[in-house]
């Protein structure tokens, strides 16, 4: 079984001692985290650990840790900041603005090379752990919380066990699609083991349909996009027809049939038919087979609610993040199940509808996607919100609208007048050398932007008007990574 590397454990303990020492002297740290499901879960994990041990802290989310955002944070003159789910790509900016602040970073993005390191910049990659697959930002936060709570004196009045936070750590991992091969890897497996021992989660093999806990089966099929099921994903009528051809009823005793209601034989029939359907549409068998895999049930959450399933929980958090209602997402992570939770359910519905509108827009505007040699480029302008352009780029690459032999670089206008870039690849491309995080960092620096991320998914923010120049640099870098001959060498293009 996977264990936390000794050096990581040691560094986490040192950072935890650093925090505890500050708290014991009456300090109030600020936790600053990323706005997506992983970031919200990560922030909530650190926040919970600190407050359950009886100390105060302030937690907030931001869209991306940009120069301007760190400068604004510095203006508040914080004594201590804990960055979760980002920070390692912004060490130079943190050093520039937060010279007199105590800093802890808990991150899983590829770190940027810097002249002088921040002492407590704890990043998965530095310990030989693949931060795109083996541990998420909330996983790093979980191991930090564990080190912190283990070092605290037991409070007689609380029943809190830090390993209960494993549930949120897995929600974050699923939110970052770390399970999209159909299985969890590396430290994520250890988190699962600890969560199972704490009685907060259960992992089983099942069809990885969206909304296992809450949707009628035909809706669960329609809503599943990871993996994308050509002809069924996004289409209610096709999903109904598909079930009817398989002789699986939509309703039984006047109640909609859910995935959980199927007999073993029906489930098998459905699984085989779904895989065949994908293979017929030329989905690679490995991706088609990932429709069956590990699914996580959160045992402390109420049955038949979106929070009971890790994937739906993560989508709900993404919906809060993308609507910029971070406080609601954090509150749900921290256990709020009243009015704010009800509002999050509304955002979840709107988020799903919006994604489907974006997807339809693309299918009707295929000319917005250009083949740019080693990459595809999608120019969405104002048509797609900057907060979901990454999700949409991933959907397009997985949907077979495109032949997924090259990554996609998507552009959307940002509210601050700049341009948001999201890049998405797949495992085959990464295995061939693709590293989108490095390509984003390289090209954004050449156009005075900021970028980074993971090998398989990355992003950037660049000045308006610089899109073509940026794309040229990205394309060059990716061509080099994938060892694609240059356009000149093959006699030019077009
Ligand atoms: O900033 P953060 O690390 O939390 O975000 C990771 C992003 O990478 C998520 O948007 C996730 O959807 C994306 N991703 C992906 N495909 C993968 C792994 C991650 O699109 N295989
Ligand atoms: O925003 P998007 O989902 O496309 O981001 C993909 C990945 O790239 C995320 O992990 C995000 O944190 C990272 N990213 C980054 N720097 C940026 C923008 C995105 O590291 N400026
Ligand atoms: Zn993350």
Image (tube, rainbow, N blue to C red):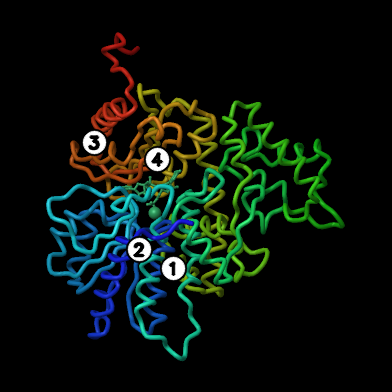
The answer to whether the residues at label 1 and label 4 have Cβ atoms under 8 Å apart is no
Residue ID for mark 2: 61
Pick the residue in front: 383 or 347.
Answer: 347
The answer to whether the residues at label 3 and label 2 have Cβ atoms under 8 Å apart is no
Comparing labels 1 and 4, the label whose residue is closer to the camera: 4
Residue ID for mark 4: 456
Q: Position of residue 268 (x, y in %)?
A: 75, 43
Residue ID for mark 3: 443
Residue ID for mark 1: 330
| Quarter of the image where the C terminus is located | top left
- Other-residue count near label 4 (Cα within 10 Å), few / some / many at <14 / 14–19 / ≥20: many
Q: Is residue 150 above or below residue 438?
A: below
Q: Secondary structure at mark 4?
A: loop
Which mark is first along the chain, 3 or 1? 1
Q: Position of residue 393 (x, y in %)?
A: 44, 38
> What residue lies at 31% left-to-right and 25% top-to-bottom?
479
Q: Quadrant of residue 285?
A: top right
Alpha-carbon span between mark 1 and mark 3: 33 Å
> What residue lies at 77% left-to-right and 40% top-to-bottom?
269
């Amino acid at each position: 079984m996977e264990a936390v590397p000794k050096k990581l454990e040691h560094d986490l303990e040192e950072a935890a001692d650093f925090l505890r020492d500050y708290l014991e002297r009456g300090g109030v740290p600020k936790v600053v985290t990323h706005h997506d499901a992983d970031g919200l879960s990560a922030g909530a994990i650190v926040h919970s650990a600190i407050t359950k041990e009886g100390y105060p802290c302030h937690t907030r989310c931001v869209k991306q840790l940009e120069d301007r955002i760190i400068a604004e944070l510095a203006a508040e003159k914080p004594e201590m900041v804990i960055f979760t789910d980002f920070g390692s790509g912004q060490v130079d900016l943190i050093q520039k603005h937060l010279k007199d602040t105590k800093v802890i970073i808990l991150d899983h993005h590829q770190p940027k090379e810097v002249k002088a390191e921040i002492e407590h910049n704890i990043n998965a990659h530095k310990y030989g752990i693949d931060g795109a697959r083996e541990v998420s930002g909330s996983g790093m936060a979980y191991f930090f919380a564990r080190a912190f709570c283990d070092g605290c004196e037991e409070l007689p009045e609380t029943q809190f066990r830090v390993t209960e936070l494993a549930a949120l750590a897995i929600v974050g991992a699923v939110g970052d699609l770390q399970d999209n091969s159909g299985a969890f890897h590396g430290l994520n497996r250890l988190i699962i083991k600890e969560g199972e021992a704490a009685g907060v989660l259960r992992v089983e093999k099942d069809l990885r349909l969206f909304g296992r806990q809450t949707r009628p089966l035909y809706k669960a099929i329609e809503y599943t996009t990871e993996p994308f099921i050509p002809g069924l994903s996004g289409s209610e009528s096709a999903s109904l027809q598909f079930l009817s051809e398989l002789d699986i009823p939509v309703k039984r005793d006047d109640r909609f049939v859910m995935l959980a209601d199927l007999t073993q034989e029906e489930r098998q029939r459905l699984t085989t038919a779904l895989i065949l359907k994908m293979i017929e549409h030329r989905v690679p068998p490995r991706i088609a087979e990932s429709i069956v895999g590990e699914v996580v049930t959160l045992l402390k959450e109420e049955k038949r609610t979106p929070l009971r399933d890790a994937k739906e929980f993560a989508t709900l958090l993404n919906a809060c993040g993308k609507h910029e209602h971070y406080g609601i997402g954090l509150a749900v992570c921290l256990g709020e199940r009243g009015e704010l939770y009800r509002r999050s359910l509304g955002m979840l519905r709107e988020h799903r509808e919006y994604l489907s509108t974006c997807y339809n827009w693309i299918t009707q505007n295929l000319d917005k996607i250009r083949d740019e040699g080693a990459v595809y480029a999608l120019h969405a302008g104002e048509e797609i919100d900057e907060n979901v352009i990454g999700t949409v780029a991933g959907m397009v690459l997985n949907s077979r609208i495109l032949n997924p032999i090259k990554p996609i670089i998507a552009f959307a206008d940002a509210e601050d007048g700049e341009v948001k870039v999201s890049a998405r690849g797949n495992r085959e491309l990464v295995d061939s050398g693709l590293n989108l995080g490095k390509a984003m960092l390289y090209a954004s620096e050449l156009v005075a932007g900021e970028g980074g991320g993971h090998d398989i998914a990355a992003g950037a923010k660049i000045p308006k008007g610089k899109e073509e120049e940026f794309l040229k640099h990205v394309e060059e870098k990716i061509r080099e990574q994938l060892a694609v001959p240059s356009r000149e060498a093959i006699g030019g293009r077009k």
